[in-house]
């Protein structure tokens, strides 16, 4: 099935955010042209990758250095996007799917993503599942003609999932049985954001803000050591804010039922599937995760959304106690529930 990303919807969302005075979910203080008070120059740009618009602001000690940082960031995202694009027959991920049970020796980065997927499937009792490619194709959410599948078709997908296995033997990654499709969409974008931030830090970048369609990651602080001010979209009215937090050197990731969906017979069907039912999870409107790692935030925002407000909150509090993540849940009535260490709203 050919992928048909909903670029119009993504563009509209970006425009709405900008009109509301947001920088793709973030509202940093306005920066002057030329060097700022600390002698840093700003490079600001947006580009399309991984089915979303990625916006960034990076600072360097010269205009040329800032632009070089931007190039490095874009190259990192583009490389990982190409690696994990299951619709591109030449991508590494597609070759893994084609190899099936025979397996394929994969790169260190794809190996790390697979390890994360396997580990967190166990820790979330199966709520995090990356073998949903054929189920996703069945629903075709984000495509030109999404529709609720027949119950028999969903039942067949669930039977396939009950036998599905993602296995690592050294560096060899295998997917089985036949017909199961590995889709790393629930971890790849966060992983790419982490990789881009790591590359920038290694190159000497001291300040950056990256937004990849619901995944925000910061490097350093704003001018004068101020924390970044991050606005949280309201799931009920996405053009408005549901809250504001301040942070630095953190990743903030949101998964919600308002980001990619279609409506049929008055019911909204979104892209976050419950592996137990074969239908979109419906016990929350959004989950926002604050963590050191965007990949972890990506995984947790999806898994906790599927787990729901009781089981998900129990795991979130455990993660909070371990210092791994803080979480904000948007409940069915649009009220909020937070873990003990959540930085709060202003």
Image (tube, rainbow, N blue to C red):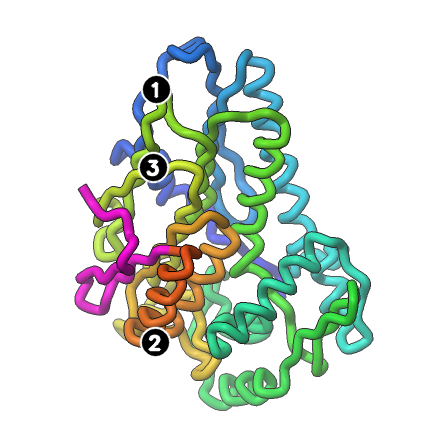
Q: CA distance from mark 2 to mark 1?
A: 41 Å
Q: Secondary structure at mark 3?
A: loop
> Where residue 190 sits: x, y (%)?
52, 51
Near mark 2 (Cα within 10 A), the count class, few <14, some 14-19 or many ≥20, is few
Instruction: Tell me: 60 left or right of 35.
Output: right
| Residue on which the image places disc 1 | 224
For the magenta stretch, what is the residue range? 326-346
* Quadrant of residue 130 within the rendered picture: bottom right
Instruction: Tell me: 44 left or right of 227.
Output: right
| Residue on which the image places disc 2 | 311
Residue 16 visible in the displayed image: no
For the residues bearing labels 3 and 1, Cβ distance under 8 angstroms:
no
- Does label 2 or label 1 sit earlier along the sequence? 1
Prevalent SS, magenta region: loop
Instruction: Tell me: 182 left or right of 245.
Output: right
| Residue on which the image places disc 3 | 26
Residue 259 visible in the displayed image: yes
């Amino acid at each position: 099935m050919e992928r048909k990303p909903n670029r119009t919807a993504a563009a509209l969302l970006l425009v709405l955010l900008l009109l509301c005075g947001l920088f793709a979910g973030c509202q940093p203080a306005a920066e002057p042209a030329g060097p700022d008070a600390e002698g840093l120059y700003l490079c600001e740009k947006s580009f399309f990758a991984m089915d979303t618009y990625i916006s960034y602001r990076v600072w360097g000690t010269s205009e040329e250095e800032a632009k070089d940082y931007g190039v490095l960031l874009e190259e990192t995202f583009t490389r990982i996007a190409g690696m994990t694009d299951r619709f591109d027959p030449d991508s590494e991920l597609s070759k893994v799917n084609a190899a099936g049970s025979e397996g394929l020796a994969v790169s260190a980065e794809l190996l790390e993503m697979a390890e994360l997927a396997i580990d967190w499937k166990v820790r979330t009792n199966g709520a995090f599942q990356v073998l949903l490619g054929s189920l996703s194709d069945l629903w075709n959410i984000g495509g030109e003609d999404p529709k609720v599948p027949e119950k028999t078709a969903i039942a067949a997908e669930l039977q396939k999932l009950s036998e599905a296995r993602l296995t690592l033997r050294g560096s060899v990654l295998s997917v089985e049985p036949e017909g199961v499709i590995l889709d790393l969409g629930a971890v790849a974008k966060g992983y790419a954001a982490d990789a881009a931030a790591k590359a920038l830090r290694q190159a000497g970048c001291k300040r950056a803000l990256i937004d990849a369609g619901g995944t925000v990651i910061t490097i350093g602080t704003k001018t004068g050591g101020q924390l970044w001010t991050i606005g949280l979209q309201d799931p009920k009215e996405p053009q408005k804010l549901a809250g504001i937090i301040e942070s630095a050197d953190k990743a903030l990731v949101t998964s919600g039922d308002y980001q990619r969906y279609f409506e049929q017979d008055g019911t909204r069907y979104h892209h976050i599937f419950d592996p137990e039912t074969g239908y979109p999870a419906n016990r929350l409107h959004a989950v926002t995760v604050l963590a050191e790692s965007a990949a972890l935030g990506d995984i947790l925002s999806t898994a906790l959304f599927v787990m729901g407000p009781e089981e998900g909150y129990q795991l979130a509090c455990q993660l909070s106690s371990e210092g791994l993540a803080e979480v904000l849940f948007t409940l069915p009535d649009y009220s909020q529930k937070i873990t003990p260490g959540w930085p709060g709203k202003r």
